[in-house]
Amino acid sequence: MHRPAEFRPAGATVRPGPGIPYPLQRAYVRLMMWLVGRLLQASSAVDPVIMREVAELPPGFAFAMRVRAGGPGFAMCEQDGRLRLMPLQQAGRLQLSFDFKHLTHAFLVLGFVEGTAVSFARDRMSVDGNLGAGMKIVRCLNRMEAVVLPKFVARRALKAYPPIGLGEKLAAATRIYARMLLQLVGGK
């Protein structure tokens, strides 16, 4: 008899994620959501590739990336050609949301165990809203990850690593991290 891939014998326990205790997964996902939001905000101000993508978004476009059931996440809106963070609780009406169905699913993606495309294919996350604009946001996220992450990590996170020279990568990463630090210190 053929059993489905998700079959678990009676009494079997399901470990959260790749052996990492759930409270640590939660803390890690919260930290990574905080970091991804700030890096995306900074990159929308200094990276020309991301700036072109953001310029094509509808004015006031708002989106969120979050874990369902009140888990960690962030919200952003387009303002003056840049992406700006806003409190998730005050996001109001969103034109797009990327929702991880479980905290462990977000941990797998944000921990670079599995790429976003694989997670979506395995039905671990959903996208709701303006899909055309969603593709622009995904391209922004992919570009940001390719630039700020070491190549061996970015290859695990991305479906396809873009052709980007080391000099361009280092210069762009320096600008993005510097902008993020300025935003943290300056509060903007």
Image (cartoon, rainbow, N blue to C red):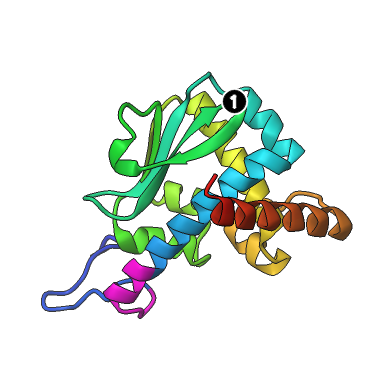
Locate residue 157, reporting x and y percent: 58, 58
Label 1: which residue? 80
**Quarter occupied by the C terminus:** top right
Main SS, magenta region, reads helix
Disc 1 crowd rating (10 Å Cα; few below 14, some 14-19, many 20+) is few
The residue shown at (80%, 60%) is: 170
Q: State the image coordinates of residue 71 (x, y, percent, origin top left).
A: 28, 54
Q: Nearer the viewer, residue 152 or 144?
A: 144
Looking at the image, the residue that sits furthest to the left is 10
Determine the image quadrant of residue 150: bottom right
The residue sitting at 44% across, 53% down in the picture is: 119
- Residue 25 counted in the magenta span: yes
Nearer-the-camera pick, 140 or 162: 140
User: Which quarter shows the N terminus?
Assistant: bottom left
Q: What amino acid type is highlighted by mark number 1?
A: Asp
Range of the magenta residues?
18-27
Q: Is residue 181 above or below residue 90?
A: below
Q: Secondary structure at mark 1?
A: loop
Residue at 40% across, 47% down: 74
Residue at 70% x, 29% y is 52
